[in-house]
Amino acid sequence: MISSGLGYAGKDEKTGKEKFDKIYSIRVLDVEFGLSPQLMMVQWNHQIHLWLKYYIYNRTLVPGKRPGLMNNMAVFITSAFWHGFYPCYYMIFFFAAILSELAKDIYRSRILFRWIPHPLSSILASFLSMLMMNFIGVSFMLLTFEKGIRFSASVYHFVYITIVVMFVIFRFGGVTKRAAKLEKKIQEKAAAKASGGPNNIKKEK
């Protein structure tokens, strides 16, 4: 991209140095140290991500409805078809779609994890994301269903089980709703404190 000139984005206004990030394939640091599987997948093959976003994902959206698992699944299955016809492609991209949705739900529920110190929470998020992505990466390269199942069985299928169980808990167990209510309550308390107490809020109303 850089050698061809397609990545050239002019000069930085502050430093005066040339920029080569107009078109790029990967952001290495975001992939290696990303805090969510979703970020890692977006920055792994960025231009393909943009194509899938604009030509597949956006076209599956229904006006007035919040995007969900089916919209993501359409993107990942299309990507699997793009790669070829090995069974592991479809198995891995299926679970990657669920993992992506799980990452969104965990982010929406981040208020529930506020008790974890900030540096530790970032390290933990990066470690778990890399663990999941490495498992998916290895499975992706095994190609055949038999090899993929054998590899997964060697670690007791813990990644697949974790993804599905956590997704069900967060999506259908009311975790994200509980987190939203708690976050709203905390924000209301903060607003009341900033305005001098709940009496002032009542007067303003």
Image: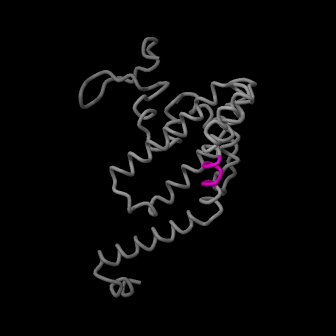
Taking 153 as reference, is 98 above or below it?
below
Instruction: Decide whether residue 99 is among the magenta residues.
Output: no
Q: Is residue 26 left or right of residue 81?
A: left
Which secondary structure dominates the residues rendered in magenta?
helix
Percent position of residue 116, x then y: 38, 58
Taking 202 as reference, is 26 above or below it?
above
Percent position of residue 144, x then y: 73, 26
Q: Residue at x 66, y 36 (%)?
A: 93
Instruction: Decide whether residue 165 is among the magenta residues.
Output: yes
* Quadrant in the picture for residue 53: top right
- Numbered disc total: 0
Q: Is residue 118 left or right of residue 146?
A: left
Taking 84 as reference, is 61 above or below it?
below
Coloring basis for residues: one colour
* Quadrant in the picture for residue 183: bottom left
* Quadrant in the picture for residue 18: top left
Where does the magenta region start and end?
A: 161-167
Q: Residue at x 46, y 58 (%)?
A: 110
Q: Is residue 60 left or right of residue 50?
A: right
Taking 55 as reference, is 205 above or below it?
below
Q: Residue at x 74, y 29 (%)?
A: 146
Image quadrant where one finds the C terminus? bottom left
Percent position of residue 1, x then y: 47, 17
Of 16 and 45, nearer the camera is 45
Of 133 and 49, nearer the camera is 133
Given the current orientation, which residue lies at the most extreme top position? 3
